[in-house]
Image (tube, coloured by chain):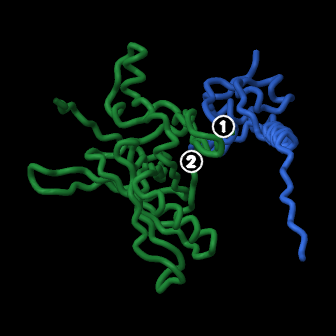
Chain colours: A green, B blue
Amino acid sequence: MAKLTSFTKACGKNKPKGTKLKCYVTYTGELSGMPQTREAVVLAASGSPIAGDTKIYDEPWDFSTAPTGEGFWRSFPILINTGQFRNFEEGEEGGKTMMNEIVGFIDDNGPAAREFVDCLRAGNGCIIGMIPDKQGNHHVCGDIENPCYVDVEEGGTGGDRVGYSIRLYSDSGFTNMQYDADTHGIDITPNP
Amino acid sequence: MAGKQVKETPDLAALQAENKELKARIEEMSPKAVKDPNEYLPKAIQAKFEVVNWVGGSLQHFGRFGEIDLTMLSLVKAQSLVRRGFSKLRARS
């Protein structure tokens, strides 16, 4: 059973809202597994985990089993002030879950953008998303067993904006994990 | 009366040999997986720096360190990365 510990406020740090420019996506089938959490890594090294270690992936993403030309993170740009990562509860008492969601706007209606949107929709239920917040923390949406689904509610030549409103969402049941990209990197090169 | 069209039997052995040669050429041209990521570094940089605990391809994004392409790493960038605490690159002693 999960036990509450004290949670202290971190003073002296700016917390700007929103996300950075790029959102990353990859296919669940290209990963050979999810990275270990920082808690697992610290325990394996006979250390003592600290608060927050269960919510951080502290190993590189493993694309070693993906075929040639696959096994990497694709990216797409999100229009300023439209990107957000949300965790929200759904369901009635006795049946609640926690949904994770990445929303954003791709401000382009050219052929390459439309092709990308079609490919993204085709990956419905087969992808994992990741987006950095303004502080540089990379938030992960979905995992191999709870992949992301894709909503592209509308888009095109625009009434207000030209482009596509994108929503990636996953029912992991918990608040999202984050990934230590500063240490382990985001591989954007396909396997040779 | 029109002559009968003779169906030419393809030379199977020749086709198989050509197929084998083409496959070998494709294999030669394809980028190879490197066992040691230090092989990605330009020779001049390899002499002064080494890559440690690098997993995956030569081009990766490292959050606040930005995009790092080991194949295009310059001396100035390598020195800057080490100075800023990038854990995957180390100056050789």
Question: How many C-alpha atoms fall within 10 Å of the one at disc 1: few (<14), some, or many (≥20)?
Answer: many
Instruction: Tell me which amino acid carries mark 2.
Output: Trp
**Whether residue B49 is situated above or below residue A71 in the rendered picture:** above
Image quadrant of residue B34?
A: top right
Near-viewer residue (A28 or A1): A28
**Which chain letter goes with mark 1?**
B
> Measured from the top left, where is residue A101 in percent x and y?
36, 56
A11 to the left or right of B12: left
- The quarter in which the N terminus of chain B is drawn is bottom right
Where, by quadrant of the figure, is residue B49 drawn?
top right
Specify the subunit that label 2 lies on: A
Determine the CA span between mark 1 and mark 2. Answer: 11 Å
Helix, strand or loop status at disc 2:
loop
Q: Can you tell which mark lies on residue A73?
A: 2
Question: Which residue is painted at 75% across and 19% down in the image?
Answer: B92
Name the secondary structure under disc 1.
loop
Residue ID at (76%, 32%)? B40
Q: Amino acid at mark 1?
A: Gly
Residue A93 sits above or below residue B68 on the image: below
Where does residue A184 sit, x and y in percent of width and height? 55, 34
| Disc 1 to disc 2: CB gap under 8 Å | no
Residue beneath the point at 35% across and 37% down: A55
Q: Quadrant of the C terminus of chain B?
A: top right
Q: Which residue is mark 1?
A: B57
**Residue B25 seen anywhere in this rendered image of the structure:** no
Number of the label disc, if any, that sits on residue B93: none
Q: Position of residue B17 (x, y in %)?
A: 85, 38
Do tags 1 and 2 sit on the same chain? no
Q: Nearer the viewer, residue A57 or A91?
A: A91
Taking the spot 50% from the left edge, 61% from the top edge, the residue there is: A120
